Amino acid sequence: MADAAAGASGSGTRSGSKQSTNPADNYHLARRRTLQVVVSSLLTEAGFESAEKASVETLTEMLQSYISEIGRSAKSYCEHTARTQPTLSDIVVTLVEMGFNVDTLPAYAKRSQRMVITAPPVTNQPVTPKALTAGQNRPHPPHIPSHFPEFPDPHTYIKTPTYREPVSDYQVLREKAASQRRDVERALTRFMAKTGETQTLFKDDVSTFPLIAARPFTIPYLTALLPSELEMQQMEETDSSEQDEQTDTENLALHISTDDSGAEKENTSVLQQNPALSGSRNGEESIIDNPYLRPVKKPKIRRKKSLS
Amino acid sequence: MNRKKGDKGFESPRPYAFIYFYFYFFSYTTHQVVCINNINFQRKSVVGFVELTIFPTVTNLNRIKLNSKQCRIYRVRINDLEAAFIYNDPTLEVCHNESKQRNLNYFSNAYAAAVSAVDPDAGNGELCIKVPSELWKHVDELKVLKIHINFSLDQPKGGLHFVVPNVEGSMAERGAHVFSCGYQNSTRFWFPCVDSYSELCTWKLEFTVDAAMVAVSNGDLVETVYTHDMRKKTFHYMLTIPTAASNISLAIGPFEILVDPYMHEVTHFCLPQLLPLLKHTTSYLHEVFEFYEEILTCRYPYSCFKTVFIDEAYVEVAAYASMSIFSTNLLHSAMIIDETPLTRRCLAQSLAQQFFGCFISRMSWSDEWVLKGISGYIYGLWMKKTFGVNEYRHWIKEELDKIVAYELKTGGVLLHPIFGGGKEKDNPASHLHFSIKHPHTLSWEYYTMFQCKAHLVMRLIENRISMEFMLQVFNKLLSLASTASSQKFQSHMWSQMLVSTYGFLKSISNVSGKDIQPLIKQWVDQSGVVKFYGSFAFNRKRNVLELEIKQDYTSPGTQKYVGPLKVTVQELDGSFNHTLQIEENSLKHDIPCHSKSRRNKKKKIPLMNGEEVDMDLSAMDADSPLLWIRIDPDMSVLRKVEFEQADFMWQYQLRYERDVVAQQESILALEKFPTPASRLALTDILEQEQCFYRVRMSACFCLAKIANSMVSTWTGPPAMKSLFTRMFCCKTCPNIVKTNNFMSFQSYFLQKTMPVAMALLRDVHNLCPKEVLTFILDLIKYNDNRKNKFSDNYYRAEMIDALANSVTPAVSVNNEVRTLDNLNPDVRLILEEITRFLNMEKLLPSYRHTITVSCLKAIRVLQKNGHVPSDPCLFRSYAEYGHFVDIRIAALEAVVDYTKVDRSYEDLQWLLNMIQTDPVPYVRHKILNMLTKNPPFTKNMESPLCNEALVDQLWKLMNSGTAHDWRLRCGAVDLYFTLFGLSRPSCLPLPELGLVLNLKEKKAVLNPTIIPEAIASNQETFSNSQDEEEIDMDTVHDSQAFISHHLNMLERPSTPGKNSMLHEHHHHHHHEHKKKKKKHKHKHKHKHKHDSKDKDKEPFSFSSPASGRSVRSPSLSD
């Protein structure tokens, strides 16, 4: 209700095209205006010459609430009796329920000084402008029931590829990749050299071949042994498919370890790249009895005694 | 005692072999408890106690000697009674109170004596404990003694190594760890014990460490218990298999624990964050286990096995009872190709030593060769199985070449030295500058070569008795030992776990029934290798191959070979083996040929392995059916063969002989035949996919040499270029290399090597052809590893090596200063690459920093060739502690080289300082090693660096500065020898007083005033004559020789005269050596007597250093 009021109050000031476009809003406004006219005529009838806008609004609101309540109650009563259309008796019961003396109604309706309000003009249903269609909408294929919404306009999904001659020459590509990488590396190292400490091979010139100064590490073996993130990423990219195969063969190898060694005897090539161990072990670990996996014991009580 | 009896039955020229073993022993240790209850990483200190259970074997035992170094001993109790003790370590300072004695000969003798004085095998030790008188009666009843010793260790310099990274956090978070290390018996450095490989006992080991740490030690982990405050835990280990103290080890750190998924008794440990690498690296170990257990038909002797990977390792692999300590740098991920076989080799090596070396220990030092031999031999078998026969044979050949080169250089490696009843003079290795009587006096290089020879000799024994028998012998040794190990203490049973040369040979003769005595005599009891020179002629009339085989057995390091020698002759009709008898005087051998020369008939030629091949025989000599000849193809003699045959024969051998060793030999020989035919043969080999990759790799280098020799007639593109292009470059654009794919390791290695070899090509101006340089630069430019499964760090490193190889000396105009402006444009391109690579390494470091290492080497090459100003600053900064060890070594190598080339005193001092102060023992050892290999000057050289201060400094270094590390001290001795020789350094002033006195003794009438003049005018003569002195170790001690020498020198001042004298002396020397042993010995005895007579008169004391010293040594008593 508050929304409706707010909408009504704003309607006078705003004549924005937004509201007019919405038919529901339009209807709302028209009704409100009619109600206002009714309230005003009732006030005139009662002898008022003028009224503040706020009081008119309040009365309008009250009237609207009253009528709405009648409608709502009447609907409830009718539904209560398993009907969909309210009858006169429903309305009567409602009015009675709301404490209205129905008997006074015919007399009130026939009062002499009543003002007659003309019916609000019936406006034509505004015609929704036809959307610009580009091409024929596709009909539903047979497996889609017809009650589903139609296909959107073709222009929303149709692609119109445009062709430009791509660089597919292998040599040029390699050349490009190489020089690009080299440029990046050079720029990066130069930047690092410029911003940090450097060493030089020529005493008289520090800028032509700047070497980033050697910096000792606290734990040098970590950087030396662990693969860099880039390499890790690369590895994941290159052999994600192969890894699956590897784990498969490995599981096999685990079961038939004796055969495996025999097979490998023949395969005495330069190196045998043994596949990395996979997670198959993780499950087993719980049952492995290894002294290093056993829990640490609590100190013996005997000791405590001697200490205390 | 029974051992001595047994020795008699064995016909060996070693009457004294075991006399000193157990002879001096008055007691046995049966059980030892080691308890370390506090380890402080901050202060690097250790507090603990040991408890030895000892059985006296003689009555009136009143002193017990134990080994202990650098430990502070607080208290000794025997059976709960306080015992007095004396601590005296003569090796702390080898030569005392002498001011000007700077003679290496003197030092070596003194050092050997000092080591003897504390040798546990002779019943000696640094710590002498007096048995309290209350217990004498107890001892007389031969009852058990329990010796309880409280000790602490503060900032140990050797034996235990602390690694404490200087970062924030608790010790565990920092990755601080500590481990035992050392060379041979070094356990005495960290707890008192009988530090011998022959004294076995059972062990209980307890270590209380921080709760976040793990203590890994020998034997079974019985339990781990928290201390009362729950902040620490105690690891209790029991080792029930009798083990020598020298095989006890320890590693404590915040290790990550990995239980081997295949063998749950095996546990791997590594430092934090490295677990993924550990998983990958050790994933292969179970196969090694299976292999050894299968061939030895014996289970792994210990109930568990532990591998620990630690930083700043002393050696890459150290095997101890039931655990091995490895360098953490052996760990690698699955992307690394080159390190994988190396690491696997290390794992296999350590495991072989678990059986022979740890479980089976040695009776005495002279039996060391058996253990090293067997473990090396079974490791070789593993190699053969794992990497194939080609790799194995190649390895054997490599090892053989190494040992031959070393023996020829230094004069021989003796596997089984025999030391006569304590006579110092009876030195079986008088050609060396150190004593081989103790492992602790050996040069590290000698010891490496010793191990190499040992396993080669084992292989010779296998050749003689067959592998089956060999393995049976090993199995017998192992099963005897494992029976013995399960027994309760019975000393004679436990001694079954010790191997002796005698016992080993006896097993061999029992098992095989063959007499291998000649073989042992030749290779084990005497040093030296055989040097054959072979040539041949084909006698067409008789259809006989006349083979001439000469030997050189007079040069140092050689020996005469008498016995069978296999010769393989490849003829047109097939390959035939002939066994020649090499005898005293027969040089010529007639070998009948099987085939007539008939090259017109087109027929396939059968090879040794039964294969039949088509050959183009047009290159052959029309009259001869011989294709090629090989002497000793199976390498069944430790020898060097120089064989002469025509170039086409070498080419046939390269192309068609299937043995990789033969191929390698022919490649080496073809270097001398730079002809188009050789070129073709090498190129064909390069292209052959089936050919062993190492052969193809060496063919690359040979091809480069040949191309350089025939540079004026060379046609076509630079050698190997078109080949490389065909193999590794894109079909459409031949100047661009394919994106890397290293799935085929053979071609990976070839791809890596070819550019390195190509960079060695030179044009007529002796410059690297521009085309080659551009080619290599392009390889670098287009290198693309994005699609590769493997890391390309080694490949890129080799590309930098290739760049370095292409550098030629700069053309310099009157020594102008090198500046950027006059930089050669090619060098500019190279520098550009190096700069970029080196800088990129800072941002994206490669595995083991291989690229940085190569860059540093390349920069040094540029400096050396005069393109870049020579300057050690860059290298010095990379050599600092805190860089990865490979980088440091590469940088130090450059500094060493700089020191030599620029004769920089400052840098030599810097290096010497580093030797004394660097925290990493391996680096210190390596600096000494590199200085010895690339010395700033040698003994006959004039150098501004050679001065008295340096002599004093080095003397001090080896005399007292390196007492905490045997290896380092021996390294210092090696360096001293290289720089100054055996005798008094020539830069020192002559001990004039001695000279005068000697002259008097000789009663030579000489005006003393002319002496300095004569010396001054003959500086060169003098230094040369000193060189001559060192030929005989005893000369210096023999004052007579000393005098006559100087007299000779004074009498013959002119150079020509000196030469003739030198020759004479030389001759005399050889003559002496040819004498029979007994005489030799006798002579020495005589000398000895003489020596002692002279002793009193001599101005500087030559007295036996060991005897004199103990009085003066500072003793540390309670």
Image: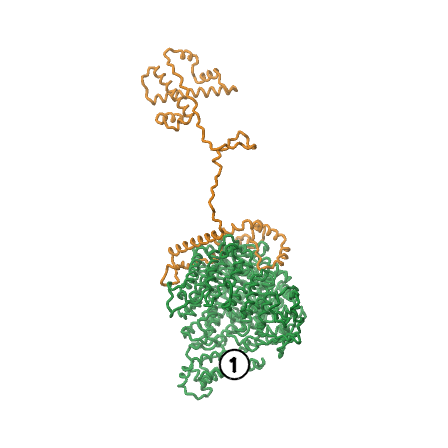
Q: Position of residue B692 (x, y in %)?
A: 58, 62
In this picture, is B343 found above or below B971? above
Return the x and y of residue B387 as percentages of the image width and height. Answer: 59, 61
Judging depth in this view, the residue of B797 and B475 nearest the camera is B797
* Residue density around tag 1, few if under 14, some if 14–19, many if 20 or more, within 10 Å: some
Q: Is residue A269 found left or right of B916 in the rendered image?
A: right
| Location of the N terminus of chain A (image quadrant) | top left
In the figure, residue B952 lies in which quadrant? bottom left
What percent of the width, then of the height, locates residue B112? 51, 74
Residue bearing the label numbered 1: B1066
Subunit bearing disc 1: B
| Above or below, comparing residue B28 to residue B264 in the picture | below
Residue extending farthest to the left is: A49
Colour chosen for chain B: green
Q: Secondary structure at mark 1?
A: helix
Q: Report if residue B226 is visible in the image.
A: no
Rendered image quadrant of residue B358: bottom right
- Image check: B1076 left or right of B801? right
- Whether residue B655 can be seen here: yes
- In terms of depth relative to the viewer, which is nearer, B41 or A147? A147
Palette colour of chain A: orange
How is colour applied across the structure in the image?
Answer: by chain
Amino acid on which the number 1 mark rests in the picture:
His
User: Taking B58 as reference, is B745 above or below it?
Assistant: above
Give the camera-side residue of B561 and B859.
B859
Residues A278 and B234: in front is: A278
Residue located farthest toward the front when viewing the structure as drawn = B600
Q: Is residue B585 above or below residue B697?
A: below
Q: Position of residue B997 (x, y in %)?
A: 44, 84
